[in-house]
């Protein structure tokens, strides 16, 4: 089986967080606990933000009191200029405190928002790197990357804006009502009776908003994943003239996102409208009564002015809370999706007390009665009662038709998966008893496609051993027949290779992958169709590099081109997850079995 055909199809199971609307995820703000926990790591900044928040709320509520003093005393008959100026200076002081407090509040709240988002991104990314390949077969990496951007942006909005607005309005609402009781108790009682009427629509509409908000985020994630997928395959899209189809497909995804957003907007609009009508309608009726009190002389003009302004602030505070609640619900949906990634437990993890691998390393690899099925294809056995002993320094070639189980051997050897039955040992130690990091420290892989990163040549080469010096890097490059073209790059090792090494040819990419494996210098080498996609000249250069790389190492080679593995110490022939033949090229060619048939197809002869 080749590297592509054996990998289970992505998305065959329901991805996490997609179309999985469970009550646990959608019926409360509890997912935001993750956000609060992250913010609590910075108590100094939280305290400063809260202090600034309380100062600005108090200053805002002091403005109506200032207007009351100006109207009742500054505008009183017989007041001189000095007396009038005194009350206006008092109001200017309040405004100054409000301005400075707002600046401090904005700085510390925004700082917390950015810091919390950075910490969450780091924590999620750290956990993603711990998860086994099986997780990414069931969950699209493109969709996950969308969560890391769009969902964290929502979290930043919640911490950096929404929470601040919510707390400020809560303080202003409570403080404003207290001041209203001081000004006019009877009028305030009527205002307080309206508050439960505001809570009811928030509760009723809020449940629906939560569900639709999560749907909206899922649709946005779908768009991001689609854009990444199409742009990364642009040559295929244009080569097959599929631009219009991709435009239509993207348009359909955008329309689905827009339809979901329309439902969310409509619900929030209705909720906001109902709450504002109830609050401001009640305020209007109360002001009516207040105006009657002024006309009868039971309330002063300054008192009613302060009551009107404070009542407006209180009404605005409760009206804003409806908007804030909707934002908090969206933030809770985003936090829920990120928390799923954060809490995902790796299926391949070090044991509580890992067994140390022997030193020095020998390079032996043993498969005994191994049976394995991929998690996404439990009905198909990739390996069946598979047994293979590879001695230190031996070169074993693995051949067979696609789907035979060849690449699965490599996946199990590096412990990307655990078999359902049987035992795999490295230097005599069961892989399940060892730390996966220790296992992979002893194995170097040259994949079918030379996987490179969007970085310079130096970083791509020293990915095999990050602390390697330039002298060692060039030595590995020369051994891999890569030094010539690296020296011709505009900036040498500092040249950026582009996304997936796009600035290099296929043969050059493969030689860099070989140099990276050389630099790693491990006792076991895995070669997965390392020359399958190369032209004759590139194949010769790569094969020369591979010959150097294989010296004094235990090597497993997957090959479809039988000419490249004639010199192997042993050839293992696989079919349907089992070993059907093994021996030398000469022996197998004369045996008349599967290998002989494959050789006849490639070499144009029945026997060698």
Image: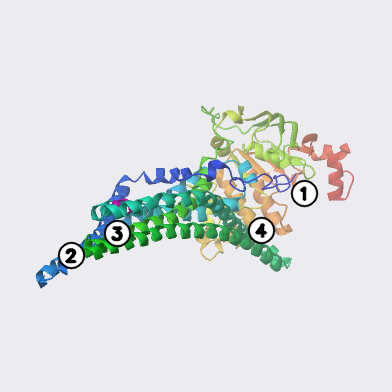
Label 1 and label 2: CA atoms lie apart by 98 Å
Q: Is residue 92 above or below residue 427?
A: below
Q: Nearer the viewer, residue 179 or 413?
A: 179
Reading the image, the residue beneath label 3 is 310
N-term mark: 3 or 4: 3
- Which residue is at the front of the view, 135 or 208? 208
**Label 4 SS:** helix
Image location of residue 570, percent across then percent down: 75, 37
Q: In this rendering, does residue 307 appear at all?
A: yes
Counting residues from the start of the chain, the first of labels 1 and 2 encountered is 2
What is the secondary structure assignment of the residue under circle 1?
loop
Please identify, in this view, whether the residue under mark 3 or under mark 4 is nearer the observer: 3
What residue does disc 4 label? 506
Q: Earlier in the sequence, mark 4 or mark 1?
A: 4
Q: Which mark is residue 561?
A: 1
Residue 89 visible from this viewpoint: no
Of labels 2 and 3, earlier in sequence is: 2
Give the extent of the magenta segment.
173-177
x, y (%) of residue 586? Answer: 82, 39
Residue contact between numbered discs 1 and 3, judged by CB atoms under 8 Å: no
Q: For the N terminus, give its image quadrant.
A: top right
Would residue 66 appear left or right of 252 to someone viewing this image?
Answer: left
- Report which quarter residue 245 is drawn in: bottom right
Residue at 40% x, 57% y: name it: 279
Q: Quadrant of residue 276?
A: bottom left
Whether residues under marks 4 and 1 lie with C-beta atoms below 8 angstroms apart, the answer is no
């Amino acid at each position: 089986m080749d590297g592509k055909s054996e990998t289970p199809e992505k998305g065959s199971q329901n991805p996490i967080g997609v179309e999985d609307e469970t009550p646990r995820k959608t019926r409360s703000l509890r997912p935001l606990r993750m956000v609060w926990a992250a913010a609590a790591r910075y108590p100094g900044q939280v305290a400063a933000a809260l202090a600034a928040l309380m100062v600005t709320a108090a200053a805002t509520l002091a403005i109506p009191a200032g207007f009351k003093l100006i109207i009742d005393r500054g505008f009183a008959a017989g007041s001189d200029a000095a007396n009038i100026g005194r009350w206006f200076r008092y109001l200017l002081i309040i405004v100054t405190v409000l301005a400075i407090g707002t600046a401090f509040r904005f700085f510390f709240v925004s700082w917390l928002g950015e810091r919390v988002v950075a910490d969450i991104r780091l924590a999620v990314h750290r956990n993603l790197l711990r998860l086994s390949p099986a997780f990414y077969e069931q969950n699209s990496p493109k969709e996950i990357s969308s969560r890391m951007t769009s969902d964290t942006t929502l979290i930043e909005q919640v911490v950096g804006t929404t929470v601040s607005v919510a707390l400020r309005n809560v303080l202003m609402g409570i403080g404003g009502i207290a001041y209203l009781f001081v000004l006019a108790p009877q009028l305030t009682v009527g205002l307080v009776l309206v508050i439960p009427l505001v809570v009811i629509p928030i509760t009723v509409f809020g449940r629906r908003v939560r569900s639709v908000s999560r749907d909206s985020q899922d649709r946005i994630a779908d768009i991001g994943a689609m854009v990444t997928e199409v742009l990364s395959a642009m040559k295929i899209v244009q080569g097959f003239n599929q631009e219009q189809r991709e435009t239509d497909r993207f348009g359909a995804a955008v329309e689905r996102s827009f339809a979901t957003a329309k439902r969310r907007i409509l619900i929030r609009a209705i909720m906001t409208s109902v709450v504002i009508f109830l609050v401001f309608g009640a305020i209007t009726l109360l002001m009516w009564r207040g105006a009657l009190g002024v006309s009868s002389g039971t309330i002063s003009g300054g008192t009613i002015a302060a009551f009107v302004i404070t009542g407006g602030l209180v009404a605005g505070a409760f009206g804003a809370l409806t908007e804030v609640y909707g934002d908090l619900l969206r933030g809770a949906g985003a936090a829920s999706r990120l928390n799923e990634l954060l809490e995902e437990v790796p299926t391949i993890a070090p044991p509580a007390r890992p067994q140390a691998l022997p030193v020095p390393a020998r390079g032996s690899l043993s498969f005994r009665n191994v049976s394995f099925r991929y998690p996404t294809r439990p009905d198909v056995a990739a390996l069946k009662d598979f047994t293979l002993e590879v001695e230190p320094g031996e070169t074993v070639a693995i051949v067979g038709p696609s789907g035979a189980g060849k690449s699965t051997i490599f996946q199990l050897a590096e412990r990307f998966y655990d078999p359902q039955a049987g035992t795999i040992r490295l230097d005599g130690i069961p892989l399940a008893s060892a730390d996966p990091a220790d296992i992979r420290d002893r194995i170097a892989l040259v994949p079918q496609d030379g996987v490179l990163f969007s970085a310079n040549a130096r970083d791509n080469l020293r990915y095999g051993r990050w602390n390697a010096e330039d002298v060692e890097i060039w030595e590995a490059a020369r051994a891999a027949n890569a030094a010539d073209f690296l020296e011709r790059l505009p900036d040498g090792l500092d040249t950026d290779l582009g996304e997936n090494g796009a600035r290099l040819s296929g043969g050059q990419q493969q030689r860099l992958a070989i140099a990276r494996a050389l630099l790693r210098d491990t006792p076991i080498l895995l070669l997965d169709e390392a020359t399958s996609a190369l032209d004759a000249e590139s194949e010769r250069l790569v094969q020369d590099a591979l010959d150097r790389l294989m010296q004094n190492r235990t090597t497993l080679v997957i090959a479809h081109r039988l000419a490249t593995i004639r010199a192997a110490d042993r050839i293992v022939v696989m079919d349907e997850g089992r070993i059907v033949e093994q021996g030398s090229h000469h022996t197998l060619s004369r045996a008349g079995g599967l290998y002989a048939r494959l050789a006849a197809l490639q070499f144009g002869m029945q026997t060698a």
